[in-house]
Image (cartoon, rainbow, N blue to C red):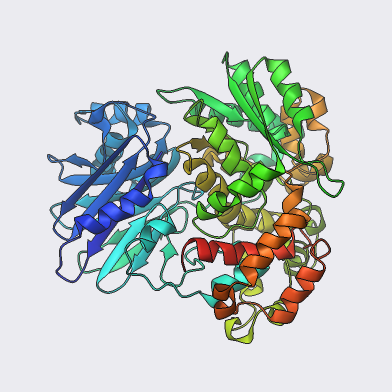
Amino acid sequence: MCGICGEIRFDGKMASPERIERMGNCLAPRGPDGAGQVVRGNVGLGHRRLKIIDLSEKAQQPMVDPDLGLTLAFNGCIYNYPELRAELSGMGYRFFSHGDTEVIIKAYHAWGPDCVKRFKGMFAFAIHERDSGRVMLARDRFGIKPLYLSQTPQRLYLASSLQSILKTGDVDTSIDREALHHYMTFHAVVPAPLTIVKGVRKLPPATIRLIEPDGAYRDEVYWQPRFGLQPGDEAMTPQDWRDAVLESLRQAVERRMVADVPVGVLLSGGVDSSLIVGLLAEAGQTGLSTFSIGFEDANGEVGNEFVYSDLIARHYGTQHHKIFVPGSELMEHLPGAIAAMSEPMVSYDNIGFYLLSREVAKHIKVVQSGQGADEIFGGYHWYPPMAGASDPLSAYSGAFFDRNDATLRSHLSPQWHAEGDVSRDFVRDHFAMPGAEDPVDKALRLDSQIMLVDDPVKRVDNMTMAWGLEARVPFLDHELAELAARVPSAEKLKQGGKGVLKEAARLVIPSEVIDRRKGYFPVPQLKYISGPYLDMVRGALTSQKARERELFRPEYLDDLFAHPTDRITPLQGSELWQVALLEMWLQAQEI
């Protein structure tokens, strides 16, 4: 896990080592163990390293293979690199290092851009061909690893964070109205390639981009799972699906233990993270470190789920670390969490993951986490109403959207209105794509390929990497996801959601965790804003910078200030926190 950055010139100028250094310094928290850059004419790549696999300097980056004429800057982990290395060695390739980075270089030389189809892991990388001048960019299937871009006819910048690109001082930082519509409507999800900043875009997941020396490029989507039964699936019983899911997840968890340093688990106490712990214990892992976090109660809502994480920790005898964050410390560290966001993310989980990661990084460098299970196996409350829905678009938007287009226009100042109802149009077009005929599958495909990428997955990456911590997500193993897409939606929706996964879990972990009420990272102080938190958000939204920006109508803000705990979105989020978080993020990035 690391941070990458780079500059490609199309105007005959040389890439700037000084600019790449500024971009790389911004990524230092992602890679505190080393730094490097390689500049060759119009192409320069930078890297910040977190040592996880092959701790020697032979694996330093950017990695140059002079014999093959290839230079690579890579962020992530290829879990099946030992098998690929053996295959490539059999083809005659010789290796000078022992990790996954060099495997990517040899795989690219052997198989070209199709090499990404062989990778099992999470990755974002740029690879430069010395002889042709071409550059290939790639991002993993679920976008677990970020890749931000800013391209003009003269140049292209790339980086693992939006902030790194801003450090070039050469980017249009005006707010994108379409992205703003998504942020305020699509529960803060801004789909690729958009970001809230007009001059910065992001490479979509499961995409490679081939860039010619003159700046011309083409994109290729290399993975798209099909939803619904495939030939031969008709004979599968519920028990068959259960067993297949358990075996696939077992492989996914085992696959993510590859490392030259210890691997722990973020243990929320929910079925997903508990199942990861159970499978690791089943595989013979001992002395496993687990970590949980809790916050102060507020407005009658409990701020922790320690009863369940404690249960699992005792059951498996893990080395458990329980972290409690008092309100004063939450307030103190909110600015740091907001500054660490590559894009504004409204979920309260952000501060939880940020502070949890701070503590975890004091003990280990790698953790497994349970993100993705809800989007892959149907765990959210809006999936059951989708079953048999005659109007899937209305059913989904009614449950997931924070507000409709008409309401949004009454909240935003007129100059910030988008042209049309872009969020509803986006969902409509996604639902119309072939490959998911069942309404539930349409929602699962949208959530797993769009919402998941730009909410839970981005949240985990940003908050863990702020402290140089690598998070691995076995539920987003692409082979497991392909299997889950085939499972009939009726099996997923059983038992209040994730039925097939819960049945698999019953073969591994205590039922008390499985049959509990679904929980989240509870941070009630940010849902029911009052006292110093109300003062903080009011201060941001009435500041000189906010007044000059004039994103929101004054009467809407006055209403939020007067009724801060009453304005709750359909997904139980605070409207006041949503608008304040956006303004605080813009100010943190000096936009």
**Rendered residue at 66%/22% (across/down):** 278
Q: Dividing the picture into quarters, in which one does residue 566 lie?
A: bottom right
- Examine the rendered structure and indicate whether residue 233 appears above or below residue 186: above
Residue 437 image offset from top left, x and y in percent:
67, 59
Residue 511 image offset from top left, x and y in percent:
81, 25
Residue 380 image offset from top left, x and y in percent:
75, 49
- Examine the rendered structure and indicate whether residue 565 appears above or below residue 348: below
Q: 355 or 216: nearer the eye?
A: 355
Query: Looking at the image, can residue 558 be seen?
Result: yes
Q: 287 or 106: nearer the eye?
A: 287
Q: 100 or 332: nearer the eye?
A: 332
**Rendered residue at 58%/63% (across/down):** 584
**In the displayed structure, does residue 149 sit left or right of residue 289?**
left
**In the displayed structure, does residue 588 sit left or right of residue 570?**
left
Q: Quadrant of the N terminus?
A: top left
Q: Residue furthest right?
A: 300
Query: Looking at the image, can residue 117 be seen?
Result: no
Q: Dividing the picture into quarters, in which one does residue 59 lie?
A: top left
